[in-house]
Amino acid sequence: MLGPNTALARDVAEMLILWPHLDAALERDTGQPEGGRISGGRAELGLPVNADVMLALATLEREVPKITAWAAGVVAEPVIERTIVGHLQQLPRLHERMLVTAAHDEAGRLAAGVRAFSRGVKLAVGLRTPDVPLGQYCPLHDDPLRELVAPGNEGHLRYTRLDGHGQPVAPVVEWVRDTGVTCRHCRAAWAPVQYLMLGRLLREADARRTAAPIDEGAA
Ligand SMILES: [Zn+2]
């Protein structure tokens, strides 16, 4: 595709391909009762789960215009009403503008937001396995307490060109396994070689929280 080859641009390119499949997946899930699909059930491997599809659609419809408007504001551009696809197409350029204008924190925030959208879309269409909660809170913050996870595996679409409908010709899915531990709230991540350090941080956090318990509702 044209434009910058950043992680954000690759996420956007994949979302533009997968977006039409969300609508199709929802129809397949909710329509034609004699077709045998059970709403909300993960009946067969690779078939989208209705709840994940609806959540991904609702999140994109609500959040994509919001983040695009915010990004346009950061680089002092007017906010223009567009479709979701139209908004998504603007994001790589707005991200590049942020980098050029040294708005690095904002560029990082935009990339993280788009990454989160992409994870939701991929979960919905069967291109990602769910994160596995690890039963330990992130040691880096007490408010909010957020459980560390082993990230799910993610499928990346590999293809050489798009057809006239913006869909890849003969795509191949390359599955990538992330072996670390991460916090989806603060985006801290620890690779296996850092687990000793993570263990120390977890013990320190436990001691800190025992000494100064925050409000009971959060426990
Ligand atoms: Zn965290």
Image (cartoon, rainbow, N blue to C red):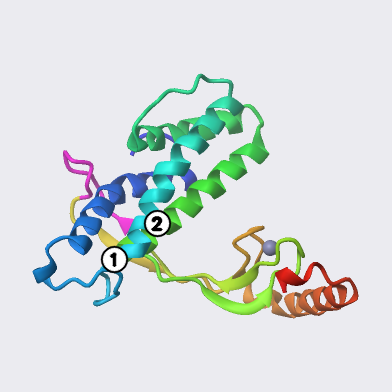
By secondary structure, the bulk of the magenta-drawn segment is best described as loop
- For label 2, the SS is helix
Please indicate whether residue 194 sits to the left or right of residue 55 in the image. Answer: right
Indicate which disc residue 99 carries: none
Q: How many marks?
A: 2
**Measured from the top left, where is residue 211 in percent x and y?**
90, 75
Residue for badge 2: 55
Q: Please identify the quarter of the rendering in which residue 82 is found.
A: top left
Residue for badge 1: 48
Q: Magenta span has 166?
A: yes
Which residue is the extreme one toward the front? Answer: 217
Q: Residue at x 55, y 32 (%)?
A: 71
Classify 105 as above or below 157: above
Question: Dot 2 surroundings within 10 Å: few (below 14), some, or many (20 or more)?
Answer: some
Q: Is residue 156 visible?
A: no
**Measured from the top left, where is residue 63 in percent x and y?**
47, 43
Q: Quadrant of the C terminus?
A: bottom right
Amino acid type, callout 1:
Pro
Cβ at disc 2 under 8 Å from ligand 1: no
- For label 1, the SS is loop
Looking at the image, in which quadrant does ligand 1 appear? bottom right
**Measured from the top left, where is residue 109 in percent x and y?**
60, 44
Amino acid type, callout 2:
Leu
The foreground one among 102 and 216 is 216
Q: Residue at x 60, y 28 (%)?
A: 74
**Measured from the top left, where is residue 39 in percent x and y?**
26, 68
Q: Residue at x 9, y 70 (%)?
A: 34
Cβ at disc 1 under 8 Å from ligand 1: no
- Find the distance from the CA under tag 1 to the CA under tag 2: 12 Å
Classify 56 as above or below 12: below
Magenta part of the chain:
156-168
